[in-house]
Amino acid sequence: MRNAFLTLMLSVAAISCGSRTNSIEIGVNRPNLFKYNVVEGDEEQTLRNQCDKIDQIYSSGCREMRLTITDFKYVDRLTRHIRYANSKGMRVTVNFLGVNVYPDSVKRIPPMGPPRRWGGWPAHQMDLDKARREFGHAISTWHDAGCRIQAIEVGNEQGWCEFNGDFPVLPKGEGMCYDSTYTWDTLPEGVPEGIRKLAEVTKIVRMQVDSLWNGSRDRPQVLVGGLNRHVEMDWCRSVGGTFLLPELVLMIYKGTFPGQKEREDLLEYADGVGIHMYPHPAYDASYDNKVAYIKDYIHTMMDPIMKVTRLPMYVTEVGFRSKGPEHEKERLELFKAMMQAFEETCSLYDWRLVQIYSWDASENHTFIDEEGNQLESAAIFAR
């Protein structure tokens, strides 16, 4: 019975949530598509190359895609991507990741290897007036072009030093988690102020979206940018990484963090919360043990969040590492186990979508080989 049920779930690439009429769509991330296969001086050829990538994703059976924008100068290019995906019936989530909404005097922190591989901005120095202008231009461009956007995710892993430059990087072996024993004044300088500014940007985006779509059923949902938690601390500690528990990030949004003076509830401007999960069950574990492990991971991360908010949850990143063709059968089984774990926890957490990281943007997380052929694990998207 279990195998038959999983076959059915795999065939429709969605998880039914108990008695709910909606289901959780299974999609994929394709970050930085606007940088893929660029032909200098030939924008139309560049766009054809990038739309070919959307075709490749579509051919897998995937109908849900998360695109990122890291630079506002690519708004027009991303507009074409969204419209092309829409023309094929694909739903699109847009993630604003590390965009420049800072004064000219503020410089981006350069990459330095784990745990700050991508660099980042000191969020507390954000210019909210510049954010209002830049986000407003991007969102109005997409609205006026007729883009159908399922969700707009504001920020990315804002409670983690990888993407929020306010968090310190500590000596290797001394990485740590800031937990509920900390107050506004005892967190590292700038950390709570920066997260609160990101909450202000969420409010700005929501008000812009409401104004443009004006009650339309097609209004994009506005999400708190993907929150993560290092449930397994070994790697985080080894590289000197630091992070704030996701439930505490949400408390700063709500104005309920210990010692916080600003009390306006900015979480009320969000339609949902982006969640990032990277569990590490053993590839050679039994199927049932994989399901149990992933469910334990989900409970560890989500139960504290449920004490802060009951907003819908959008899993905008989740994944298992690619370990070579010889391990693709086990990797596909991990994705099946993941699907079952989400299905079995639907009554506890209001899952709305699951977007796997990533189609091919990382050699450690990919669904295609070097020749562009789909790996066995891409069957998770089949309909």
Image (cartoon, rainbow, N blue to C red):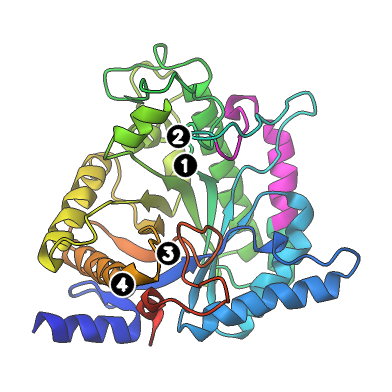
Q: Tell me the quarter of the image containing the N terminus.
A: bottom left
Residue 254 visible in the displayed image: yes
Left or right: where 105 falls relative to 283: right
Disc 1 secondary structure class: loop
* Label 2 neighbour load within 10 Å: few <14, some 14-19, many 20+: many
In primary-sequence order, the first of circles 2 and 4 is 2
* Label 1 neighbour load within 10 Å: few <14, some 14-19, many 20+: many
Q: Amino acid at mark 1?
A: Glu
In the picture of the structure, the residue carrying the numbered disc 3 is 355
Q: Amino acid at mark 3?
A: Gln
In primary-sequence order, the first of circles 4 and 3 is 4
Q: Amino acid at mark 2?
A: Trp
What is the magenta range? 117-138
Picture coordinates of residue 149 (x, y %)?
A: 57, 68
Q: Amino acid at mark 4?
A: Leu
How far separated are the C-alphas under marks 1 and 4? 26 Å
Disc assigned to residue 160: 2
* Label 4 neighbour load within 10 Å: few <14, some 14-19, many 20+: some
Picture coordinates of residue 270 (x, y %)?
A: 46, 49
Disc assigned to residue 332: 4
- Residue sitting nearer the eye, 88 or 265: 88
Disc 4 secondary structure class: helix
- Residue at 37% in and 59% down: 319
- Residue at 44% in and 70% down: 27
Disc 2 secondary structure class: loop
Picture coordinates of residue 279 (x, y %)?
A: 28, 51
